[in-house]
Each structure stands twice: as C-alpha cells, then as structure tokens.
Image (cartoon, grey):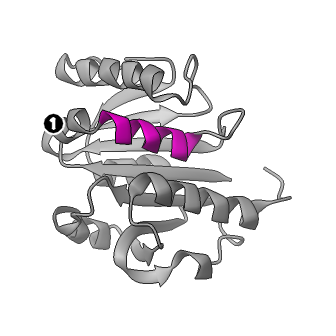
Amino acid sequence: MRRHFVLLLSGLDEFLENVPRVSRCVSSALMLSHDLRRDAVLYILLSAESKYIVFDASRLRSISPDESSMSGVLKKVARAVRERRRRPHWGVRVHEGGLREICERARPQLRIYLSRRGRDLRLLNFSSVRSVCFAAPLALRLSSFETELALLRFEPISVRLLKAEFSFVLVNNELDRAWAGRAQ
C-alpha cells in the first residue's frame, strides 16, 4: 500500500512565507507519533517554478517533527530550489515538472483532492485500493489548480477541517482504518 500527499503551492514565495505550516504538513503526511510512515510520500508542488519537491519517508534520515528542526530542512530545500540543486537532504529530492509529472511518478489508483464541495472523506471505500494520492492547497484557493485536477481525474472530497495539515491527518486515519491488517 502506498499513500501519496500533494501540497499545492503557488510558488517558492508562498512556501517561504508559510514555513511553519509547511512543516506541519510534512509531519502530518509522513510521521507517526514515534516513527515515519514508511509507505508515505509527500510532494510539494511549486507551481510558479514548475518544480516539485519529494519527501520519501522510506528514505528520509535525520528528520524530526518539531517545527524548528523541520524549518531548517525546509530552508535547505528552498535554497536548493533557488540554486537548482536536486538533493537538499537525505530522502528529499527536487524535480522539474508539475501535477501531471507527480501523477506519473506516483501512479495512484485513487486520486482525491480537498475541496469545499465533494463527497465526505468518510464515505470513500479505501479498502479496495492499494495506492491513494491526496492533493490539498495550503490556502484554500483552488481555482488555479482545479482545472488541472479535473483533467487528471482527481475527485473532490470534503473534510470538516479545511486546512491541508489537518486534512492530511484525517486521510491518514481513514487509510489506517481501511488498510489495517492488510499485507503490505
């Protein structure tokens, strides 16, 4: 089973202005209380730069959930994007491309995104799929992404809390319930 999370950002400026929230998104998508979710990958899309950052939990090293150490890693990532470097940290890579390239890399069976309107997350049947890709904007301004999400066959879902970091936790909880006891 594989879980893919996509944090949709307008660009590097939004990334740098919101380092504490981006830090919480990384923790929410990839971390358990005592370890990393080895089956999780977080992609941070920087739309203006046509780049995306991959945090692969199965390869991450020297990372902790506290915001101060995570912000150090995120600042290294931002520097790498500016300097066109590909490997800012263990398990973190910077790639050229956009949402289409992320989907080609992840190849999820189910594609969903956070929306004000859409099916309730709790009503989805995750037990029949082996991989899920969930996309959420940092700020709920989806208009610039909605056309592409629809073209790539993402289904809108709604959750009670419309913030990316909280929705990542809720999706992880639903996947944990659905996939409990299944062989990897």
Q: Is residue 111 above or below residue 43?
A: below
Q: Is residue 121 above or below residue 152?
A: below
Helix, strand or loop at label 1? It is helix
- Image point (39%, 67%), residue name: 114
Residue 102 belongs to magenta span? no
- Image point (62%, 32%), residue name: 58
- Image point (52%, 28%), residue name: 66
Residue 164, x across and y down, in percent: 40, 55
Residue 163, x across and y down, in percent: 39, 59
Q: Is residue 93 above or below residue 125?
A: above
Q: Which image quarter: residue 170?
A: bottom right
Residue 150, x across and y down, in percent: 30, 73
- Image point (56%, 55%), residue name: 169
Q: Which image quarter: residue 84?
A: top left
The front one of 161 and 102 is 161
69 on left or right of 177? left
109 on left or right of 8? right
Residue bounds of the magenta highlight: 19-30
Residue 21 belongs to magenta span? yes
Residue 180, x across and y down, in percent: 80, 60
The front one of 111 and 89 is 89
Q: Which residue is mark 1?
A: 13
**Residue 171 in sight in this render:** yes
Q: Which image quarter: residue 61?
A: top right
